[in-house]
Amino acid sequence: MGFVQEFKAFAFKGNVVDLAVGVIIGAAFGKIVSSLVEDVITPLLLNPALKAAGAENIATLTWNGVKYGNFLSAIISFLCIAMVLFWLIKAANKINKPAETAPAGPSNEEVLLAEIRDLLKNK
């Protein structure tokens, strides 16, 4: 098998293509979640809370040249994004919940064993 054929077999396997599609969809979904956090949740919830605490611009907080405000801002952003993803995945799981199936009846082996048991009881 030549190099080109090997590469073609590798590059166009189903799992490689699926992974590429997943990465692209993930990047697009990441933009949606980031926009939701930065453009909706932060102005509605986080900014009023920071104003009430007296720290309107948390990213500018420093101490002896250490910009710990950037670190705190990154932590808060991560927590907001994680919470939004949790809510979205929870909602998606609720929507995609599989229908409950009825329990299957006894297998053939179980039926035969029950018959044998009943015959032995009657003897």
Image (cartoon, grey):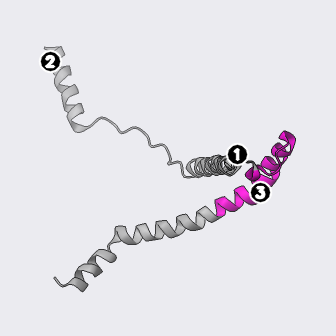
Q: Which mark is residue 64?
A: 1
Magenta residue span: 32-60
Disc 3 versus disc 2: nearer the observer: 3
Q: Nearer the viewer, mark 1 or mark 3?
A: 1
Of residues 111 and 5, the one drawn nearer to the viewer in this rendering: 5
Element marked by disc 1: loop
- Classed neighbour count for the residue bearing mark 2: other residues with Cα under 10 Å, few (<14), some (14–19), many (≥20): few
Q: Measuring 70% from the left and 62% from the top, which residue is drawn there?
A: 35
Q: Secondary structure at mark 3?
A: helix
Residue linked to disc 2: 120
Q: Residue at x 16, y 21 (%)?
A: 119
Spot occupied by residue 80 in the image (x, y as percentages of width and height)? 67, 48
Amino acid type, residue under disc 1 in the picture: Asn
Residue 30: horizontal and vertical position, in percent?
60, 62
Task: Give the mark nearer the N terminus: 3 vs 2.
Answer: 3
Whole-angstrom CA distance, mark 1 to mark 2, is: 87 Å
Label pair 1/2, CB-CB below 8 angstroms: no
In reply to whether residue 43 is colored magenta, the answer given is yes
Q: Nearer the viewer, mark 1 or mark 2?
A: 1
The location of residue 65, given as percent across then percent down, is 69, 50
Q: Residues within 10 Å of mark 1 (few under 14, many from 20)?
A: few
Q: How many angstroms separate mark 1 from mark 3 (CA)?
A: 33 Å
Q: Main secondary structure of the magenta part?
A: helix
User: Label 2 sits on what residue type?
Assistant: Leu
Res. 40 mark:
3
Left or right position of 76 against 16: right
Q: Secondary structure at mark 2?
A: helix
